[in-house]
Amino acid sequence: MGNKQAVFTHEQLEAYQDCTFFTRKEIMRLFYRYQDLAPQLVPLDYTSCPDVKVPYELIGSMPELKDNPFRQRIAQVFSEDGDGHMTLDNFLDMFSVMSEMAPRDLKAYYAFKIYDFNNDDYICAWDLEQTVTKLTRGELSAEEVSLICEKVLDEADGDHDGRLSLEDFQNMILRAPDFLR
C-alpha cells in the first residue's frame, strides 16, 4: 500500500485544481491521456516537473481535435511557444477552457485568439477569410467568403475601424448565444 509511485506531489495536484476546472480524478485521467500520446517521451513521474512537450502531430491527431478544422490554431494558441507542441500544463489548460465548466467569457477569449490568425489582437478581414474558409472547408467561392466577411464586419465592428476587437467579438457572441455551445 505504501509503495505506490506518485505521479504528482500533493501540491502539484492542488495547483492544477486551482488553475483548471477539474477534480483530482479528472486531472489524473487527462494526465494519462497526455502520457498515452507519447509514452516514450512523457514520464509517469511528474514530481520533478520534467520539461516535456508532446509534438503537435500527436496533439492534432487526438479524437477531440483530428476532425476540427481549427486543430492547428487551437494547438498553437494553447502552446506556450505558439508552435503547437504542448507541455502538460498547456494540455490541461486547453481541456479546461473547452470544458463545460469554463465560463463563457473565457471561452470567447480563446475563440477570439484562435480566429486571430495573424496574432495582432484584432480579427481583420483576412482573419475572417481564414475562419470562414476553415469553417466551410474551402467549399465557398472567394466572392462568397468576401461577402460573409463583409457582413460580419458590418454587423459586429462596433467602432467601424474595419476589424473586430475582443470587445466587438464578445458583443457579437452575446448576440449569438449558440456560438459557444
Image (cartoon, rainbow, N blue to C red):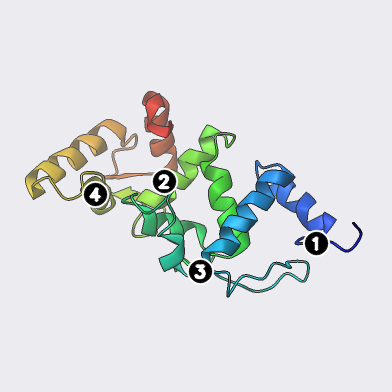
Is disc 4 placed on a helix, strand or loop?
A: helix
Q: Which residue is mark 1?
A: 6
Which circle's residue, 1 or 3, is located before the other in the chain? 1
From what the image shows, is residue 6 above or below residue 93? below
Is disc 2 placed on a helix, strand or loop?
A: helix
Q: Residues within 10 Å of mark 1 (few under 14, many from 20)?
A: few
Which circle's residue, 1 or 4, is located before the other in the chain? 1
Q: For this rendering, which residue is in front, 112 or 162?
A: 112
From the image, which quarter does the C terminus lie in?
top left
Which circle's residue, 4 or 2, is located before the other in the chain? 2
From what the image shows, is residue 31 above or below residue 128? below
From the image, which quarter does the N terminus lie in?
bottom right
Where is residue 163? Give x, y as percent. Answer: 30, 46
Judged by depth in the image, the label closer to the viewer, 3 or 4, is 3
Where is residue 3? Give x, y as percent. Answer: 88, 64
Residue 112: image tag: 2
Q: Which residue is mark 3?
A: 81
Q: Quadrant of residue 111?
A: top left
From what the image shows, is residue 83 above or below residue 156? below
Which circle's residue, 2 or 1, is located before the other in the chain? 1
Which circle's residue, 3 or 2, is located before the other in the chain? 3
Q: Which residue is mark 4?
A: 125
Q: For this rendering, which residue is in front, 71 or 32?
A: 32
Kind of residue indicated by mark 4:
Ala
In this picture, residue 10 sits left or right of residue 155: right
